[in-house]
Every structure is written in C-alpha cells, then in structure tokens.
Amino acid sequence: MANAERSGRPAEAFGAPAVGRTRTPSRTPLRMACVALWLIVAALAARQVTVALGTPRGERLTDLETWVGPNGVLHVTGSLYDSTRFTGTPFGGLVLKPLTRAAEQALGWGWTFGTLLLVVALGLIAARALPQPIGRRTALLAAPVAIGMLMLSLPVRNTLWLGQTSIVPVLLVLLGCFVAHGQRTSGLLIGVAAALQPTLLLFTPLLWFTGRRRAALSTGVTFAACTVLAWAAMPHDSHTYWVHHMAGVGLGGRADDLGNQSLHGALLRLGLNGPLEIALFLTLGAAVAVLALRRAVRYFDDGQLLLAVAITGCAAIVVSPAAWQHQLLWVLLAVVGRAGRRASDRYVWPVAVVLVMTLPARMMLPDMPSLDPLRTNLVLVAALAAATAVPFLSRTSPHYQSPTPTDCAPAAPSRFRHIPLAPFLRRVLTRPNLLLELLLIRVTYAAYSQVRLAATGGSISAGRAEAEENGRQILGLERALHIDFEHWANHTVVKIDWLRNFFDYYYESFHFGVPLTVLALLYWRRPADYRWARSALGIATLLALAGFWLYPLAPPRLMPTLGFIDTVHGVQDFSQPDYGTLTALTNQYAAMPSLHFGWSLWCGVVIAVLARRWWLKALGLLHPLLTACSIVVTGNHWVLDAAGGAVVVGAGFAVTYLLSGPRAATAAAAERERTPTRNPVCG
C-alpha cells in the first residue's frame, strides 16, 4: 500500500518524512524538548515494566499463564476450547504452542520486554506514517509522543498486565502497509494478522479498492493457508472454533460484559437477544463496514494512509463479536485525523480520543443512570465515530494546514514591569469549543474528586486521628483569636426551624449550581472573560487540593467530643470506622481550605467585577456571605476554613494575572482606544 500512493507521496513510507519549510523553529529548544519527551517515554516504560513484573505471581500475566502455564490450555490433549479460556484462533494456538516449553520466569520477563519493544516499534511506524507535509517540529516530536500515548493507553497497559497478543496483529498490519517492500509481502503480513484476528480481513477490500489487488489476493491466500495449516495440525480445534463457535463467537467472557466494546456486546447490554439481536448486529455491522471502507478509500486517495488504516481497524472493532480492551488500539491510531475548520476546534477530536483511551469511562462521564448506555459503550462510540461520522479534513482543504485563526487581544502592558510572566499565553477573545470545554471540566473534576478522596488514604477512617488532631489545633487558634463562635451559631440556628432549613438548603444546593451558572453565562455572553475567570477558578482548586493533602482537617460536625449538631447529614455513629456519611463519594476531612466558601467567593468577585448593574454586584457579593454563614452554622466548617478558601481564591486570581497580565477584554478595550485597527489573531 505504501509503495504506490496516489497522492504523490514518496514510495518509501518508512523513510525520512518530508519536512515542511513554512516554519523553522530554533534547533536547541526543539532538541531539548525532544530529549525531554524521550526521557518521559523511558520513565513510562520503566514504570510499566516495574508494575507488571512487581505484581505477585498469579495476579500478572494471567492470560499467558492460562495458555502456557503448567495447567494451561495449550498443554492439554483435548480441545483448546473445552474451557473457553483460550479465545484466539487455532492458528494463534499453533503459534503459541512452542512457548509451553519455556521456563515460566524467563517467559514472563521475555514476554513483558518483548511486548514493550513491540509498542516502541508500533509508535515509530505510526510516527513515520503521518501524512505529508509535516514540519520539523512534528517530525522530531512525533515518535516520542506516539510511543508515550501508547504506553499510557488502556489497551497497552492491559496487554502488559494480562500477557496478551493483541499488539501483534496491529503491528503486522502497519508493517504490511508502511514497511513491506512489494505487494505480496504486504499482503503476507496482513494475512497473518487476519489469521490471528479474523475481523482484520476487512483490510482485504481496502487493498482491493485502492488498487493494491496483488496485496489483497496475497492477504486472502495467506489467511487461507494459515487457517488450513492450523486445521491440518488441529482439526478438532479448528472445527470447534470455525464451525461450532462460528469464528470464535461465545469464547472468553460473557459477550454482554462491559469489557466487550463491540456492537454485539452493546446490543446485548441494551437488552436485545436471540434472532432479533443477531439480525440487527449483522445488518448494522454490514452498514458500518461498507461506510467505513468507503471513507477509508477516500482518505487513502487523499494521501492519509494511516488514517485510512485506523478507520478500517475501528470498523473491525465494531463488527467483531467480541472486542476486549486489549484489542482496541485502532481507536488511538485515529488520533491522526484532523477535524474542525477553526483553530479552536482542531483539538477536540485528538483530546477526546486520548482521554477515552487512557482514562476509565467513569472519569469521562458522571455516574448517572441516564448516561449509562453512553458510558458503558464509550470506546465503541469512539470507534463508530472514527469509522463513520467524524468529518476528517481532506489534505486539499484550505483548512487542513491553516485552520481559521482565533481572535486574540493585543499585547498590553500591566501596571507592573515584569508582568505578564508568560507573554506567550495569548489573550483569546472568542469562546473555546464547548464540547472540549465540557470534556476537560468533567475530567478535571473527576481527577479532583479522586485526589481529594485519596488525601487521607482513600477513606475517612484512614486519616481520622490526624484530622481530629488538626481540628483541635484550629479550634485552639480560633480561641486565641476570639473567633470560635461555631458552637454558638450552630446551636442557635438549630432552635429556629425555618432558619435551619434555609441554611441546610443553601449549603446543599448552591455549591455547584451558582459557579456552573456563572461559567455558562460568561461562556455565552463574555467569552474573553470566561477564559480568565475559568483559569483563576482552576488554579484556586488545585491549590485547595494541596491543602487537603497536606493538612487533613476534621470539620466541627465530625469532632465527637465538641457537641456539634450535623444539621445536613444527620447524627453520626462515631463507633463505626467510616460512620456512613458520603464515605464513598468524597473525603470528609477535606475541610481546609473551604471550597464551599472559596467557589462562592470566586462567584462574588467575578460578578462584582463584570456585572454592569449595582444590584447585580451586590447580589453577587451576598452569595459568599450567605455561604460563609451556612458552612459555619451547619457545623461543616470552621471559620478559619473560610479564610483558607479566600486565600486560595485570591491566589488563583493573582497567579492568573501574573502569568497572562490584564484580562483579554481589558487589553482589547485599551488597544481600541489607542487605535481602531483589527484585533490580531493567534497562531
């Protein structure tokens, strides 16, 4: 395939990439960045090997042990598929049988390091296969970036952990497409890959319809020869696999398991079964295959061969009876496709793909019943989108190399000499892509929740003693400052039902609602100020996480001997290790600083600065005041917790100003007063 592209690309696809001349960045910083990336890749590889080999026996390389261990299925004299533990093709079993003679310890080390080398080779080939032309920066950084993403991806981590062979078919296809000389050799490699994973036969029509007919015939002949060889060596196993199980259907885990990210698995999880499910799977699978192949041929003709290969691989995931996590690398390869005409939209697809392939689905979408069908099939949705829906740009499009630029405010001096400290951070005037923004906000909040919960060892009881001791320290400091009125306020409000109900409702309902509303209004009405405000909020939250980690603090309601009444959560049973309250959701000892007050103060400052009417400014400032009252009278925070929240929010605004200077809207307005010229654009 790589030897005769219709786009005019050089025949040797694995040779040195053509380097664009539009930009020539300084060599020294570029080389330093390249070295840094390779060091990161080495660290990731070392960590993956350490985790895989440092795990106790019986918990690592479990699939490999199932196949070639002392009692593995490859040792048995009966059928490989009697226990359904072996899910590969008979040809795969034939290839793996010689490994049964290897020493277990040597095989484990060799398998792990061999898999690591396969991942490196896969990344190098993918980096070299990028469509031309590419700049010098991309040419130098593509390989370490590609290998790093592969190392972090869930399929590779799963493969290293289980001892799977799923990287081999992907690598064979890429070798056949980008390295092999001659169509017969190319087809031979792809045919062997199909013999190991039959749905990769989808590459045969791709070869045929792109004019690589010798390669297509070679693929079919090689697949047939490998299958016949396995049938001659293991006739009973071959009959079981191809006839009884209809090409492996039903082998391995339950087809409706969440790990099966094929269309068949999704239909079963939706409650369909029997002839209706089979008919629907075959119909939809055929439609996906046809549409994906048409798109792959079009992008092949456009000179984007790696994208064409990725689209075909994604279609193979969809139409497979079972596509387990370690078989999903094709989705990550689809990151090379460019989608979006505007510069602000260009990163949506690659960021979404990288997040889907590196993070658990629960971090991508909240745990809500209405989102279950999407969250449980997230990788399938990404594969379907890549194969059939994402409008990847053609290389002939004027937006392929030069997307519509983003409007930016001109550089504007601040009141201080050395600010901004990071002048390269452009002050963008337009709103960011909404889908990308929602995705990043969700992932960031999920990470924040995980870090917050882990701050005391992953549970409430893990840090209880330290948190209570810190609580006594805070109370002692407040007594010295004569501001220890939490107990009086708590018991006073408890006696007034309507006031208690008001503050309970305010505490529970406004913490998330108000900040999200402010962000939404800024995004829609004041996009330039949205970026400034969002950055300040993010920095403040990160600083608060450091506080949670370094200083776990028990709130008044969780200090057993002080007599506070928990008006929101109810009476606590302190004899229980985790005493019930929201233990699985959040760390109850993350009280200092108070983000309840911090986020409300952020809302108040933003409204006071940006609102045009005085009553809106006053209403904005009233919110942090009521929040401060609610967190104290309900027994959920000390007074000093609110002071800590104010400190991190102030630091968030200060760091934002130090890095990027005045707000974009302020800088643009100042420039318009000086000269009515058009705003510059971001590169």
Image (cartoon, rainbow, N blue to C red):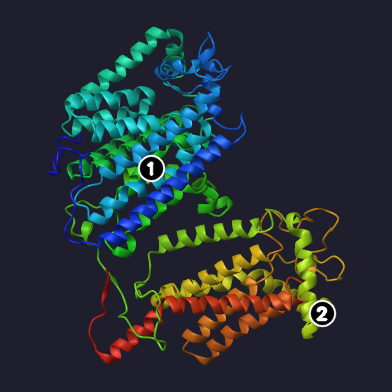
Q: Position of residue 51 (x, y in %)?
A: 55, 40
Helix, strand or loop for disc 1: helix
Q: Which of the two labelled residues, at mark 1 and mark 2, occupies the earlier sequence position? A: 1
User: Which disc, if any, is residue 331?
Assistant: 1
Residue 664 vertical placement versus 363 (above, below): below
Q: Residues within 10 Å of mark 2 (few under 14, many from 20)?
A: few
Q: Residue at x 43, y 9 (%)?
A: 234
User: Which disc, if any, is residue 591?
Assistant: none
Q: Nearer the viewer, residue 619 or 182?
A: 182
Q: Residue at x 57, y 89 (%)?
A: 618
Q: Is residue 485 visible?
A: no
What is the spatial separation of the Cα atoms under label 1 and label 2, in whole angstroms?
Answer: 59 Å
- Quarter location, residue 22: bottom left
Residue 373 vertical placement versus 59 (above, below): below
- Quarter location, residue 25: bottom left
Q: Position of residue 579 (x, y in %)?
A: 79, 56
Residue 534 vertical placement versus 140 (above, below): below
- Quarter location, residue 179: top left
Helix, strand or loop for disc 2: loop
Q: Residue at x 31, y 49 (%)?
A: 142
Q: Residue at x 63, y 68 (%)?
A: 547
Q: Position of residue 539 (x, y in %)?
A: 52, 70
The image quadrant where one finds the C terminus is bottom left
Q: Which residue is mark 2?
A: 496
Q: Nearer the viewer, mark 1 or mark 2?
A: 1
User: Could you tell whether 19 is left or right of 275 in the image?
Assistant: left
User: Could you tell whether 192 is left or right of 105 in the image?
Assistant: left
Q: Is residue 234 visible?
A: yes
Q: Position of residue 343 (x, y in %)?
A: 29, 64
